[in-house]
């Protein structure tokens, strides 16, 4: 007799043997007992969780010679025919290969005929979401009002692809992933009845790898038994499934905990030499750190799977990381897993990620400050010192603890005041400090580097008088220079203040005779851009009457004279 795969041999034959789906089996059993049998069912859920098996059990329960019953005998002719697939009353249809409207039309023609041997004709449509839209539409009327002897059972792994009009005509049952403990118990029962010696860790490793699918777990067990013959060990399972295993993960975690880059690279090299898949390494390492994260947050919790089952080992490894570091490490491992898929050199991506994890404390701090290490400028220290110094100065200015250390400024009678739009003079409270002088000097340097030669030509004879937290007072020589700066270059100089200090300072100009202490270097100013004078505006060419009129206009409208060439069209 041909060999029968384990997942077929150990397929559940009644509701009691259905593993991990008690909510479904109990509901269907109650419906059979009460005679409330639906005409259409929709079974949805992940692969290998028992959807098709449940459909066959339900078909046997309805057609068993002792039924309808919740415990089909599996001995009568009807049960045996359903088990071996020869029943004339149970039809298994693969919607992936019979998805067109013609197949559904044929089905509609056959449903009207009475059952051959049993009580019901049962149509099991697997992967029903593969039907075309036209096929679904053709099925609607039959599905809504089938003959009394017909029961439809549809199974799908993607219920969202089944039209709502179909789902509304069915009783829907959602199958869940089977837990690792349930799979482990089932595998233990299988190997015991087969007379095979198997380590519990090996069976648990298979259960974890199955990812909630009993069929996958039995297929993996079948494969491992073929390799290990009558003895199933954890090493054989790791070798066959390509798993990294607890020993390697403990070594890698210890190296990351010690931030030993050499050991990390050595472990990665050994894993590659032993044929381990790098994607698998990252996946298992992520699951391992997930266990550490959960343990650190809430301790050992029933129902939560930990890669290591030894509490002492978990506790020791979790103590080597903070919760924030573990979360950051998991996030970085997920990023590396995505990088490996598209990287031409996966090994480099993995090594780079693990080396970053070795420095996770530094990188986490940089992430909190904003940007990665590559994005941080090389002169962070100098900038930080300047920012701290500036913050200190601004705090002193606000508190009024800074006193002037410069002699009083000799200015025009209007000096020290500015006029509002209403003409009322307002006194400016400023302090001339070394920090203000430094700011002015840096502003001049910034303007020079930016190539603002016309601005530099205007301000080369200006002097710093003082500043507060909102204003910067600049002394200008008597004449038209004050109005020219305010009209044309005020915004440029204020922007330079902000570039240098990050402060939004308002530029205020006052006429003074004080010689500036900070002036731009002569060589920094282009020879073809001299500072403007009265002659540049043609004032010297005016006669006495015209000059008197000009003085009257300046008194009325202000002295903001503009050269014709500087007027924007």
Image: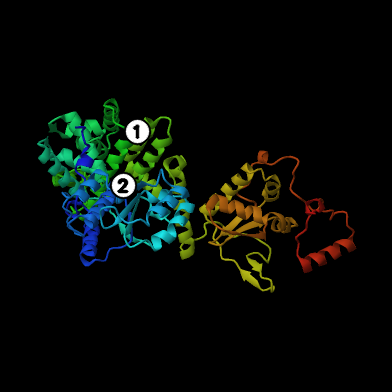
Answer left or right for 286 relative to 501. left
Are the residues flagged by discs 1 and 2 in contact, CB closer than 8 Å?
no
In the foreground, 120 or 309 = 120
Which image quadrant: the C terminus?
A: bottom right
Does residue 335 sit above or below 120 in this rendering?
above
Q: Which mark, by number, is residue 96?
A: none
Residue topped by disc 2: 47
Looking at the image, tell me whether mark 1 or mark 2 is earlier in sequence order.
Answer: 2
SS at badge 2? loop
Q: Position of residue 494 (x, y in %)?
A: 61, 55
In the foreground, 486 or 177 = 177
Residue topped by disc 1: 351
**Residue under the point 77% across and 67% down:** 557
In the foreground, 264 or 532 = 264
Q: How is the image coloured?
A: rainbow
Q: Is residue 375 visible?
A: yes
Q: Position of residue 182 (x, y in %)?
A: 18, 49
Which image quadrant: the N terminus?
A: top left
Q: Position of residue 520 (x, y in %)?
A: 63, 44
How many other residues sit within 10 Å of disc 1, few (<14), some (14-19) or many (≥20)?
some
């Amino acid at each position: 007799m041909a060999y029968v795969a384990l997942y077929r041999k150990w397929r559940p034959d009644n509701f009691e043997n259905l593993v991990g789906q008690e909510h479904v089996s109990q509901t269907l059993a109650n419906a059979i007992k009460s005679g409330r049998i639906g005409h259409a069912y929709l079974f949805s859920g992940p692969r290998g969780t028992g959807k098709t098996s449940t459909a066959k059990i339900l078909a046997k329960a309805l057609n068993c010679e002792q039924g309808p019953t919740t415990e089909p005998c599996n001995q009568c002719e009807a049960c045996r025919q359903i088990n071996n697939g020869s029943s004339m009353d149970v039809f298994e249809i693969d919607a992936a290969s019979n998805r067109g409207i013609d197949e559904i039309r044929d089905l509609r023609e056959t449903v009207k005929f009475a059952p051959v041997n049993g009580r019901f004709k049962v149509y099991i449509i697997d992967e029903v979401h593969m039907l075309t839209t036209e096929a679904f539409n053709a099925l609607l009327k039959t599905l809504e009002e089938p003959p009394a002897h017909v029961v439809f059972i549809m199974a799908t792994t993607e219920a969202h692809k089944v039209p709502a009009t179909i789902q509304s005509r069915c009783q829907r049952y959602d199958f869940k992933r089977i837990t690792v403990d349930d799979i482990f118990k089932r595998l233990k029962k299988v190997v015991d009845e087969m007379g095979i010696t198997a380590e519990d860790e090996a069976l648990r490793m298979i259960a974890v790898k199955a990812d909630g699918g009993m069929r996958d777990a039995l297929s993996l067990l079948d494969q491992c038994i073929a390799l290990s013959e009558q003895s199933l060990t954890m090493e054989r399972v790791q070798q066959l499934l390509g798993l990294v295993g607890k020993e390697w993960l403990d070594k890698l975690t210890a190296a990351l905990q010690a931030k030993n880059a050499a050991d990390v690279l050595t472990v990665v090299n050994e894993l590659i030499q032993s044929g381990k898949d790098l994607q698998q390494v990252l996946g298992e390492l992520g699951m391992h750190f997930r266990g550490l994260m959960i343990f650190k947050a809430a301790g050992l919790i029933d129902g939560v799977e930990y890669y290591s089952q030894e509490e002492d080992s978990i506790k020791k490894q979790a103590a080597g990381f903070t919760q924030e570091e573990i979360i950051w490490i998991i996030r970085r491992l997920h990023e590396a897993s995505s990088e490996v898929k598209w990287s031409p050199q996966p090994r480099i991506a993995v090594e780079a990620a693990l080396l970053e994890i070795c420095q996770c404390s530094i990188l986490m701090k940089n992430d909190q400050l904003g940007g990665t290490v590559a994005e941080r400028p090389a002169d962070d220290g100098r900038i930080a010192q300047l920012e701290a110094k500036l913050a200190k100065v601004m705090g002193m200015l606000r508190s009024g603890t800074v006193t002037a250390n410069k002699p009083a400024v000799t200015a025009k009678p209007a000096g020290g005041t500015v006029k509002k739009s209403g003409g009322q003079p307002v006194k400016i409270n400023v302090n001339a400090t070394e920090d203000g002088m430094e700011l002015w000097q840096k502003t001049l340097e910034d303007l020079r580097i930016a190539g603002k030669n016309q601005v530099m030509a205007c301000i080369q004879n200006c002097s710093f008088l003082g500043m507060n937290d909102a204003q910067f007072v600049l002394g200008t020589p008597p004449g038209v220079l004050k109005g020219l700066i305010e009209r044309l270059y005020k915004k440029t100089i204020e922007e330079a203040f902000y570039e240098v200090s990050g402060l939004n300072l308002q530029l205020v100009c006052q006429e003074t005779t004080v010689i500036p202490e900070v002036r731009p270097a002569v060589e920094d100013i282009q020879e073809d851009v001299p500072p403007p004078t009265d002659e540049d505006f043609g004032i010297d060419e005016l006669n006495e009457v015209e000059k008197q009129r000009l003085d009257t206009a300046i008194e009325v409208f202000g002295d903001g004279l503009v050269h014709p060439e500087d007027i924007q069209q």
